[in-house]
Image (cartoon, coloured by chain):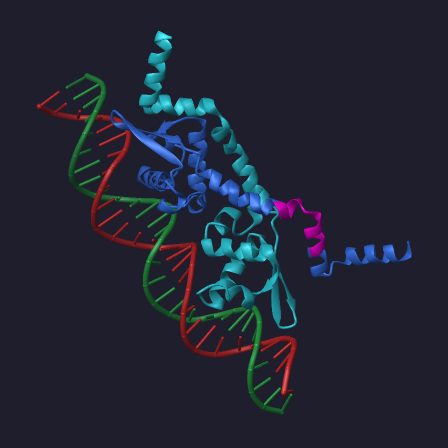
Chain colours: A cyan, B blue, C red, D green
Amino acid sequence: MSSSARKHDVFQAIADPTRREVLRLLAEKERPISEISAHFPISRTAISKHLYILTEAELVSGRKVGREKIYHLQPEPLTELKQWLSFYEQFWNNKLIKLKHLVEDGDERLKIVENNEKYE
Amino acid sequence: MSSSARKHDVFQAIADPTRREVLRLLAEKERPISEISAHFPISRTAISKHLYILTEAELVSGRKVGREKIYHLQPEPLTELKQWLSFYEQFWNNKLIKLKHLVEDGDERLKIVENNEKYE
DNA sequence: TTGACATGAAACCAAAAGGTTATATATAAT
DNA sequence: ATTATATATAACCTTTTGGTTTCATGTCAA
């Protein structure tokens, strides 16, 4: 399924700290809903809603086993996040960009460098 | 500033598509508010609020030049996101984990493999 | 100095998000 | 068969979010 066909996108799904903690718990091992919700101070129903949102983002998937529903992590959609991030990595790796920002901000340290160069 | 001291965290800041587009525009070059908002169908005030949220997350910074306020990208906080992501990369790289999920899901393809091994 | 321009700030609004409680259904255990 | 367990679903509530409009302020240009 394409990312645009997802009802909830990955960015929105991971924005909530509770959902990120749910993902972390499921990264350890698959778990039924009740076991997940035992880790939080909020109701099982609230956790169930979070799992629904994570399911829509295809970050988790649950299967019924007896009367339990066991969820496991599906990390694939995180590749979309990784791609998005990779675009910005050039900026924090790129010293020239940082220098450009110093110039734009009229940073004092830069003026000192300019003076040093003048008299070296 | 530590990430916990930030009023808006990076995850929440990038959750909104408009804010991600603002970041992309500022990745190209620094721009005043009016130029940014010209790219969107919503009001300048709305964009101003998005810039406020991005500023709180320290993803952008603005300086006043005459009557304009010129914003530029500050990508550093995205390293937090990168760190978070790196934890999950092990999962989509790890074939054993994928196999584990096949077992858990009772995937038919796995049963065929099991049969093949039995009679090889 | 007067008007136009760029932004800031406040008041307001509708919808979405994140939570609750109550009720229903399916499965397991006695 | 009856009861307990695990989850699903619906109705509801409060706060936050993303937007609006209106008005104020500071700066540039004529």
**Residue drawn at x 62%, y 73% as measured from the top left:** A67
D29 to A89, vertically: above or below: above
x, y percentage for residue A54?
Answer: 54, 55
x, y percentage for residue B114?
Answer: 82, 57
**Residue drawn at x 39%, y 47% as measured from the top left:** B4
> Quadrant of residue B28 in the image?
top left
Nearest the eye: A111 or A82: A111
Specify whether residue A44 is painted magenta.
no
Nearest the eye: B40 or A11: A11
User: Is residue A3 in view?
Assistant: no
x, y percentage for residue D5?
Answer: 57, 77
B37 to B101, vertically: above or below: above
**Residue drawn at x 46%, y 33% as measured from the top left:** B24
Where are the magenta residues, as a range? B90-100
Task: Report the side of C23 relative to A77 (left or right).
Answer: left
User: Is residue A73 in view?
Assistant: yes
**Residue drawn at x 78%, y 56% as measured from the top left:** B110
Nearest the eye: A103 or B37: A103
Nearest the eye: A110 or B82: A110
